Image: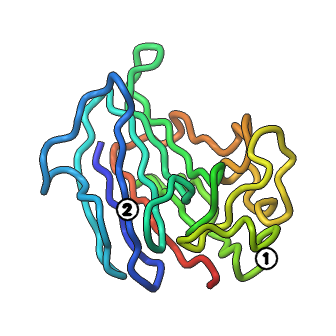
Amino acid sequence: MTLTIANKAGRPVTTHHYHNAHTPTLPSPPAAPTPGVMADGQSMHYVVPLGYGGTMMVSAGEMLGQESQLEYTFETQDGINKVALDISYFKAYSFSMVCTCSDGVKTGCDIPLFAKHQCVSPDYVNAAGACVNAAPDAGPASPFFADCKDKAYVYTFNDLATNNGNCLTGDFTYEILPNGK
């Protein structure tokens, strides 16, 4: 599986990458993603081995553990190699994000939420400027996150946001998009 991460946010972003426990690690850079600042318009490409699972967090500044995330696994399910992927605003929203498969299937939410809504209160805006999700556990989605329900994870068991095996090819592009600020 080949992943491309493209920064189309109109400004630099900071990324951090994690791989799931008990999954293969990625090769060393430049074949693996390099955490740090991505310039506007910059892309990174890497190949993910079968059995890999990981997360990339995207922030406008310091990584606080409360950012927009992309999550993906590439594993064998029922004898077929499948990719499961989603965009998650479960912890917080920092940037809009979508993923497109080379066969056109798309997941994620491209709505710039800060342009449409205010975060629930200033107390829920973290030091990096992300809107922390005030109701991630049960749902329904809080008003700030409601436009992205079922397109991105905005609360536990918002499972319609997961694209599990719907992409038929091994090339995927994650786009980091403007957030409305």
The kind of residue tagged 1 is Gln
- Location of the N terminus (image quadrant): top left
Q: Is residue 88 left or right of residue 61?
A: right
Instruction: Say which residue appears at 55% left-offset and 78% top-offset.
Output: 178
Instruction: Say which residue appears at 35% left-offset and 50% top-offset.
Output: 17
Q: Is residue 76 left or right of residue 156?
A: left
Residue 111 vs residue 140, the one in the foreground: 140
Residue 151 coordinates in the image, percent (x, y): 68, 53
Residue 118: mark in rendering: 1
Mark 1 element type: loop
Instruction: Say which residue appears at 51% left-offset and 34% top-offset.
Output: 165
Q: Which residue is mark 2?
A: 15
When the figure is inspected, residue 6 is found, relative to residue 181, above or below; the finding is above
When the figure is inspected, residue 116 is found, relative to residue 30, above or below; the finding is below
Mark 2 element type: strand
The kind of residue tagged 2 is Thr
Quarter of the image holding residue 61?
bottom left
Most extreme residue toward the top is: 78
When the figure is inspected, residue 168 is found, relative to residue 109, above or below; the finding is above
